């Protein structure tokens, strides 16, 4: 019996290899080229990043405290990456200049964040309602934990940095943009010409200009627009720009969902005597948002990556902290270590989101057919 | 009577929508008025003057990357045009490179070879999930870690790669080269008419002509012919290492190369996905039917698959071009002198006219975006399915 199974599986394996790698002589040559390519790149990268790399200590066993201790700087040409810079700057990458004794507050917020998001992401979660309540509660908890309040010392946003700023801008920007984008999308499909044209002009304007100009505008011009007493700090200014930017893109994603709903649904709701808001809330939005989730997630990935632009207006997000670390004379010139590390962090978040979007697309397909 | 009027306003759709819109526009006007007043007050308080007269003041800074001559005595207006040209240059070069790379990767993604397919897949996932700004900075720092000018890396002994950029020979157009150039243009126009003529002839008689072969021969050989007739009016100025720098030739600076690589490698990942989904969207039956009709496989691709795939590819491709153009504003991070870096950054800091300058920059990007989407819409219409479907 087992012999048969073995031969079958071997057969399958041979078939697969033949079909995918050696089906013709062109294919065979391609396979050989690809194997050499993968081998060369792979060994180069692995040697650089792992096998020949320093982590906390160099090849002489000394703890690396600045770049002169890196193996590659002691005996050039033999050794690879020097990851000690990441260890040395770990706190800054995670929290920025947040006071070290207060970082537990950030850690708690980081730990609660998945709990706040999970309720939105999975609709078959047990006790989902509780999670959703927590989602609405979370901004207040996060504000209290991060900024401070009764019982906790205040930590100004100028001390925030690294992953904290990246996540803050990404999550808050998306959270605030969501309701705004629904209004914009509904407004764009409104029958009232003035409201419609206002929404169209807003959306198309924001989509037509680069985010960096919006960030500049918010940074330079927001203080000019506002009365004397009100002076939002840099992070808040960036948040305004990011939110407006994201809401325009998200509105377009939601509009796609709205357009996909058959007219009959709206007519049926009208015939039942539902008002506009009843129809919108109970009939249109639940369906439209469901269809629009994958494109919405895609805009979220885009926004998450675009938060790195705030370094240009002087905020220290993940990339900004990385550049600051490189500007420090003790660690300068370790570009690749820093950039590869930051890329990896962004990759993990963005790839995770894109996998989620794919999972949803698959689920929606089976749901509808 | 009065209650019925209120009832009418609330329950009648037309009057209600009129009311809401008046309210909205009223609130909007008040909002704008308040902001304008506050801004005027703030500007006065800070002693910032306004107006567009600054455009005629001399800029006082130098721009290293420029397509038109610029010195620090030139005006801010000229700085604007230098920046605009740099933005357009990186956008056009980036779009071309991204399209080529994107189509290549998109086709490799559909290759029958498992390894090739997955190498392309890894490339796509790794480039599109990492911020483009990070990639630009990364490629720029790689370019800066190239050998110094003294040890510049020669390519075919004509190009030299160093941390100051790519040094390459610059063409010198001598008298008569314009005729060669015009002959090239005329050859292209002629081939378009020839193609139409031969197509019509083919429809009438059924004879096939090697249109592609004839036309490429015309386009290639006409300029070469004129080049020799005019006595070879083109020479190259080769870069030669003298002292600490290269003399002669021209240099493609690392800022430009970093932007070019960053933008096109990033955008190509997105383009490859649209290309892949475009080709997949053409149903299998189309390929099988054309094979059953006895078409050669190159014809199947050219006449059946690609025209249908283009219909799906063009709209997302347009938005990728728009994204690339907007992302070209990131040059400020590595010092590429584009619109945002020079005019929107240095000019703004020198004159303090934030509102005017940001308005000009934003309107410029808006117009570029509009022009791209308009021209792509026209192209899109020409490839769309013609018929009643």
Image: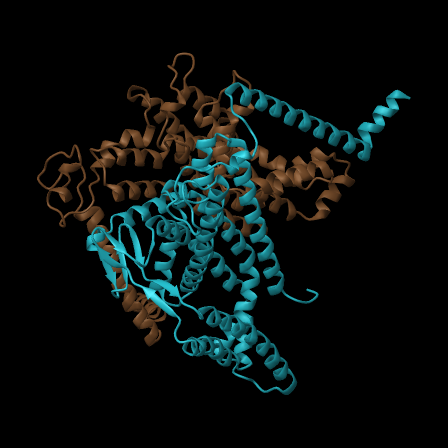
Chain colours: A brown, B cyan
Query: What residue is drawn where x is 68% and y is 49%?
Result: A262
Picture quadrant of residue A156:
top left
Q: Nearer the viewer, residue A292 or B191?
A: B191
Image height of B241 relative to A32, above or below = above
Image height of B67 relative to B231, above or below = above
Please state the horizontal and vertical placement of residue B24, each as a whole percent of the image: 70, 29
Image height of A160 relative to B334, above or below = above
Please state the horizontal and vertical placement of residue A366, each as a whole percent of the image: 54, 52
In this picture, residue A307 sits left or right of residue A195: left
Picture quadrant of residue B249:
bottom left
> Quick check: can you spot residue B174?
yes
Give the position of the C terminus of chain B as an image quadrant.
Answer: bottom right
In this picture, residue B374 sits left or right of residue A146: right
Q: Nearer the viewer, residue B194 or A242?
A: B194
Query: What residue is drawn where x is 73% and y is 40%?
Result: A191
| Count of picture labels | 0
Please state the horizontal and vertical placement of residue B194, each as a whole percent of the image: 58, 78
In this picture, residue B38 sits left or right of residue A164: right
Query: What residue is drawn where x is 30% and y is 72%?
Result: A29
Residue found at the far right of this picture: B1
Residue found at the far left of this picture: A60
> Quick check: can you spot residue A185?
no
Residue found at the far front of this picture: B175
Please state the horizontal and vertical placement of residue B5, each as a whole percent of the image: 87, 25
Q: Nearer the viewer, residue B224 or A82?
A: B224
Give the position of the N terminus of chain B as an image quadrant.
Answer: top right
């Amino acid at each position: 019996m087992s012999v048969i199974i073995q031969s079958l599986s071997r057969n399958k394996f041979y078939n697969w290899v033949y079909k995918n790698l050696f089906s013709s002589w062109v294919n065979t040559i391609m396979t050989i080229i690809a194997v050499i390519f993968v081998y060369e790149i792979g060994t180069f990268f692995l040697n650089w990043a792992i096998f020949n790399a320093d982590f906390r200590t160099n090849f002489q066993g000394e703890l690396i405290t600045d770049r002169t201790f890196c193996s590659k700087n002691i005996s050039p040409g033999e050794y690879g990456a020097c990851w000690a810079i990441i260890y040395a700057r770990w706190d800054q990458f995670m929290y920025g200049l947040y006071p070290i004794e207060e970082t537990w507050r950030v850690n708690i917020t980081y730990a609660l964040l998945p709990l706040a998001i999970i309720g939105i992401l999975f609709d078959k979660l047990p006790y989902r309602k509780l999670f959703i309540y927590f989602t609405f509660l979370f901004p207040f908890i996060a504000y209290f934990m991060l900024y401070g309040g009764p019982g906790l010392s205040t930590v100004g946003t100028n001390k925030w940095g690294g992953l904290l700023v990246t996540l803050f801008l990404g999550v808050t920007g998306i959270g605030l943009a969501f309701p705004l984008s629904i209004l914009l999308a509904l407004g764009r499909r409104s029958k009232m010409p003035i409201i419609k044209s206002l929404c169209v002009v807003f959306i198309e304007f924001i989509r037509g200009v680069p985010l960096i100009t919006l960030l500049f505008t918010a940074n330079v011009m927001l203080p000019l627009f506002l009365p004397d007493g009100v002076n939002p700090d840099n992070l808040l200014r960036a948040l305004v720009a990011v939110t407006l930017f994201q809401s325009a893109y998200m509105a377009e994603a939601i509009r796609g969902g709205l357009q996909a709903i058959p007219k009959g649904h709206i007519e049926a709701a009208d015939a039942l005597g539902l008002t506009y808001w009843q129809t919108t809330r109970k009939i249109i939005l639940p369906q439209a948002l469901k269809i629009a989730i994958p494109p919405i997630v895609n805009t979220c990935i885009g926004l998450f990556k675009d938060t790195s632009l705030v370094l240009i207006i002087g905020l220290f997000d993940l990339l900004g902290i990385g550049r600051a670390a490189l500007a420090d004379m003790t660690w300068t010139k370790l570009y690749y270590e820093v950039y590869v590390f930051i890329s990896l962090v962004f990759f993990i978040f963005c790839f995770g989101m894109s996998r989620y979007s794919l999972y949803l697309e698959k689920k929606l397909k089976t749901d509808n057919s | 009577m009065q209650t019925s009027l209120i009832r009418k306003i609330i329950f009648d759709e037309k009057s209600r929508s009129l009311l809401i819109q008046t309210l909205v526009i009223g609130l909007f006007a008040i909002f704008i008025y308040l902001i304008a007043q506050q801004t005027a007050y703030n500007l006065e308080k800070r002693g910032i003057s306004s107006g567009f007269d600054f455009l005629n003041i001399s800029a006082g800074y130098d721009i290293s990357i420029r397509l038109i001559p610029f010195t620090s005595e030139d005006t801010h207006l000229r700085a604007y045009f230098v920046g605009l040209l740099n933005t357009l240059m990186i956008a056009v070069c980036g779009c071309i490179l991204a399209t080529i790379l994107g189509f290549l990767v998109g086709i490799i993604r559909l290759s029958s070879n498992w390894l090739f397919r997955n190498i392309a897949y890894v490339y796509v996932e790794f480039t599109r999930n990492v911020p483009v700004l990070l990639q630009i900075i990364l490629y720029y720092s790689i370019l800066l870690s190239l050998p110094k000018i003294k040890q510049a890396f020669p390519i075919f002994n004509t190009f030299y790669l160093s941390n100051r950029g790519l040094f390459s020979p610059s063409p010198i157009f001598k008298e008569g080269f314009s005729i060669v150039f015009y002959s090239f243009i005329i050859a292209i126009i002629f081939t378009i008419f020839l193609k139409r003529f031969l197509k019509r002839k083919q429809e009438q008689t059924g004879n096939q002509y090697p249109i592609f072969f004839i036309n490429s021969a015309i386009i290639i050989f006409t300029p070469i012919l004129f080049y020799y007739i005019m006595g070879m009016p083109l020479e190259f100025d080769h870069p030669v290492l003298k002292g600490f720098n290269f003399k002669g030739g021209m240099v493609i600076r690392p800022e430009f190369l970093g932007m070019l690589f960053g933008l096109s490698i990033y955008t190509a990942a997105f383009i490859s996905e649209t290309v892949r989904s475009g080709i997949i969207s053409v149903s299998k039956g189309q390929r099988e039917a054309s094979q059953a009709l006895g078409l050669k496989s190159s014809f199947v691709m050219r006449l059946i698959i690609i025209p249908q795939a283009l219909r799906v590819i063009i709209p997302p491709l347009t938005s990728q071009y728009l994204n690339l153009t907007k992302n070209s504003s990131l040059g400020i991070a590595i010092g590429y002198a584009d619109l945002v870096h020079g005019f929107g950054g240095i000019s703004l800091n020198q004159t303090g006219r934030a509102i005017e300058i940001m308005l000009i920059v934003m309107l410029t990007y808006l117009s570029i975006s509009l022009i791209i989407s308009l021209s792509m819409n026209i192209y899109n219409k020409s490839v769309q399915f013609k018929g009643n479907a």
